[in-house]
């Protein structure tokens, strides 16, 4: 009976002070939404990150560490330590156990975006996310020597259309002073956004890469030795080497054996890595940051809870008469103290429910925009156990901080005489 | 000890007495002299006017009677129960079950409406809830009507009502569930003369009907004429 009375009193009291408490509740709602949102995005971004590349069983490159190989082949960060000889690539290609190979040749850039020289297998076999294939929004995949296909991010940020001519630069880096001006490339297609580094690169054929470097053997263009597109026709541009290759294995149980064999390849020192393992390792490195971010958000929630208690303590002064009435009518100090706890926890629960609503509305509004602009695929999904636990920690924390005014009131009301309004 | 009480029926059985105080003393600080209160015996259903100039220990006596302060010596029996032998929790429950209270002002819980303020004791005491007839809501409405609170005020926020109305609502709260004793601490001092007499008349009549005793404390001697029993509180020390 008294529990019901306490509930009635607490709810009536909250309603009575709704103007002040709405603001406090709003602060709490925002901070809880932030907490929940960051935890939610953390899971989603991790998923999106670890599926930057999928379906590829091995990445083969010159001997180096697995992170280095992953970074320069998939994320276009850093440079290759060495190349793979064309003959080595051919011998891998002749291995019947390997279902497909995507050759990758790196080294040039286009206005800060990597130039990836590859072949039609890239479009055919490269997968990302939950096994999604690459699609062209417009145009077609490159066929001629001087054709180029743009990643979605490059096309959008530089405003290129199919049919335009672009000049690629020699070497990496955002600003390059040596451009392949004699051999302009024609945009033949633009890829759909993927939310992966694929968007931030341009794709040409291995022959195109070879052709534009004719006459560049010393690292700069030697006048007269470079060729024009007209001269390039009919010539054979088989490269001497490639940078790396993505490999698909027919029977995946053989993956580890093939990996070992490649690592022990007699012809030249090679490294074969499992992209999934390397991605998880990379995420572990970056995981520190997102954990720090979650920690900061946790503090934001604690700050708003402290704000809530500050407001409750301020209101306590106004409640002296009401407490005197309740005490004299026979309410125990514990019942009066429980009002603070009930009110605080009720506010936290309201804030949690509102945060869920805000989060859901925010996500469903933002997800098309995130996909279009950042290629981030974030979908509404039921909360995970960890997220529920995080959400549940808010009312628990509210209960804990409410003990401050509750204990205060309990102690004061125990000493209260008849009709006394406490020490104001 | 200079006490003058017109009702000194010492022979009555304790169950039939509303209040029985003997040798009661109180002190905030054991080093100081204790405040000594007169022996009081009030029969069940009778009312007592306690005239108390300021500083005479009125609040202390009411706190001792309500079980909210512990005495230094002597005993306080309310409706036959020595309340200071009860535990703190039991004293709170005893107060909820058997005592109604009316203060000088700020009598009501500001966030409850009129009706909820009146029924508040029934939420704290099963006994008083059972004693309402036939239901808590019915008795609350009957009391409000008897105390001339217009019906359209019953669901209203109490902070919007006049002081006179607030005091009458407090009286209804004190009376609901027919407690054995009402402790009224200068409930009329904020009222004008007309309101004061009407309030007192209503309170005493309704209390009489429920055979509830009223201990009425005031510094206003002119009110004493409404009461059969009168007592002067002097605030003597040992």
Image (tube, coloured by chain):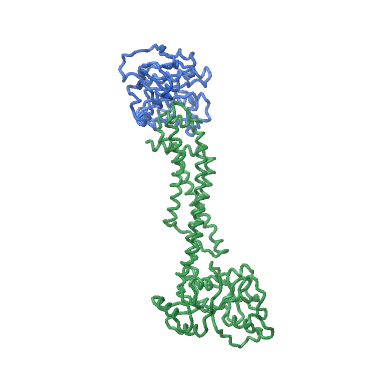
Chain colours: A green, B blue
Residue A149 horizontal/vertical position (percent): 59, 75
Q: Residue furthest right?
A: A223
- Locate residue B24 relative to residue B191 in the image: left or right: left
Can residue B183 be seen? no
**Which percent across, then down, holds residue A246?**
49, 76
Q: In this view, does A192 lie above or below A223?
A: above
Q: Which residue is drawn at 58% across and 85% down?
A: A237
Left or right? Give the position of A210 relative to B189.
right
Q: In this view, does A87 lie to the left or right of B125?
A: right
Q: Give the residue at x 61% y 79%.
A: A147
The residue shown at (53%, 46%) is A26
| Closer-to-camera residue (A65/B10) | A65
Up-down: is A159 above or below B45?
A: below
- Where A223 falls versus A46 (above or below)? below
Q: Specify the farthest residue to the front.
A: B31
Q: Is residue A170 visible?
A: yes
Quarter assignment of residue A372 = bottom right
Quadrant that contains the C terminus of chain B: top left
Q: Where is residue A414 in the image (x, y as percent from the top left)?
A: 42, 31
Taking depth in this image into account, of A219 and A377 the one nearest to the observer is A219
Q: How many marks?
A: 0
Q: Is residue A184 left or right of residue B230?
A: right
Q: Residue A36 at x, y = what percent? A: 48, 54
Task: Please identify the quarter of the rendering in which residue A167 is found.
Answer: bottom right
| Quadrant housing the N terminus of chain B | top left
């Amino acid at each position: 009976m008294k529990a019901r009375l306490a509930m009635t009193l607490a709810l009536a009291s909250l309603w009575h002070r709704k103007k002040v408490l709405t603001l406090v509740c709003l602060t709490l709602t925002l901070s809880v939404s932030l907490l929940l949102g960051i935890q939610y995005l953390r899971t989603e971004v991790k998923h999106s990150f670890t599926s930057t590349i999928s379906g590829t069983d091995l990445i083969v490159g010159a001997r180096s560490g697995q992170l280095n190989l992953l970074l320069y082949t998939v994320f276009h960060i850093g440079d290759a330590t060495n190349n793979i000889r064309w003959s080595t690539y051919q011998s891998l290609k002749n291995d019947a156990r390997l279902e497909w190979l995507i050759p990758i040749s790196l080294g040039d850039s286009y206005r800060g975006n990597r130039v990836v020289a590859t072949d039609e297998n890239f479009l055919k076999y490269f997968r990302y996310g939950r096994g999604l294939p690459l699609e062209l929004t417009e145009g077609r995949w490159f066929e001629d020597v001087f054709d180029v296909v743009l990643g979605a991010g490059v096309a959008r940020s530089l405003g290129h259309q199919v049919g335009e001519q672009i000049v690629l630069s020699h070497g990496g880096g955002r600003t390059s002073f040596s451009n392949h001006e004699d051999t302009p490339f024609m945009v033949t297609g633009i890829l759909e956004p993927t939310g992966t580094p694929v968007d931030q690169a341009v794709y040409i054929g291995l022959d195109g890469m070879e052709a534009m470097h004719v006459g560049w053997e010393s690292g700069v263009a030697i006048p007269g030795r470079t060729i024009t597109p007209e001269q390039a026709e009919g010539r054979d541009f088989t490269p001497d080497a490639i940078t790396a290759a993505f490999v698909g294995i027919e029977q995946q149980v053989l993956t580890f054996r093939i990996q070992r064999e490649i690592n022990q390849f007699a012809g030249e020192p090679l490294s074969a890595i499992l992209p999934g393992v390397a991605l998880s390792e990379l995420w572990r490195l970056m995981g520190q940051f997102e954990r720090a971010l979650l920690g900061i958000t946790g503090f934001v929630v604690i700050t708003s809870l402290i704000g809530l208690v500050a407001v409750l303590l301020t209101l306590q002064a106004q409640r002296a008469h009401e407490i005197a009435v309740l005490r004299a009518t026979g309410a125990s100090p514990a019942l009066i103290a429980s009002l603070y706890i009930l009110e605080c926890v009720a506010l936290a629960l309201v804030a949690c429910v509102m945060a869920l609503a805000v989060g859901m509305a925010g996500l469903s509004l933002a997800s098309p925009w995130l996909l279009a602009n950042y290629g981030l695929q974030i979908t509404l999904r039921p909360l995970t156990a960890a997220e529920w636990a995080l959400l549940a920690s808010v009312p628990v924390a509210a209960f804990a901080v409410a003990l401050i005014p509750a204990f205060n009131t309990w102690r004061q009301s125990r000493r209260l005489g008849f009709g006394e309004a406490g020490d104001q | 000890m200079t006490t003058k009480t017109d009702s000194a029926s010492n022979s009555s059985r304790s169950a039939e007495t509303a209040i029985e105080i003997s040798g009661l003393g109180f002190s905030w600080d054991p080093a100081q002299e204790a405040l000594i209160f007169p022996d009081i015996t009030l029969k069940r259903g009778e009312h007592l006017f306690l005239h108390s100039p300021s500083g005479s220990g009125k609040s202390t006596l009411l706190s001792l009677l309500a079980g909210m302060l512990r005495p230094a010596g002597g005993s306080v029996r309310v409706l036959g129960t020595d309340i200071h032998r009860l535990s703190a929790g039991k004293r709170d429950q005893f107060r909820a079950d058997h005592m109604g209270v009316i203060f000088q002002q700020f009598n009501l819980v500001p966030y409850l409406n009129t009706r909820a303020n009146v029924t508040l004791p029934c939420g704290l005491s099963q006994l008083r809830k059972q004693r309402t007839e036939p239901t808590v809501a019915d008795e609350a409405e009957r009391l409000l009507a008897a105390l001339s609170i217009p019906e359209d005020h019953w669901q209203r926020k109490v902070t919007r009502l006049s002081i006179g109305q607030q005091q009458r609502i407090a009286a209804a709260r004190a009376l609901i569930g027919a407690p054995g004793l009402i402790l009224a601490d200068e409930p009329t001092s904020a009222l004008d003369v007309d309101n004061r007499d009407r309030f007192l008349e209503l309170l005493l009549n309704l209390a009489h009907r429920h055979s509830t005793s009223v201990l009425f404390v005031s510094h206003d001697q002119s009110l004493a004429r409404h009461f059969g029993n009168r007592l002067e509180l002097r605030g003597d020390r040992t």
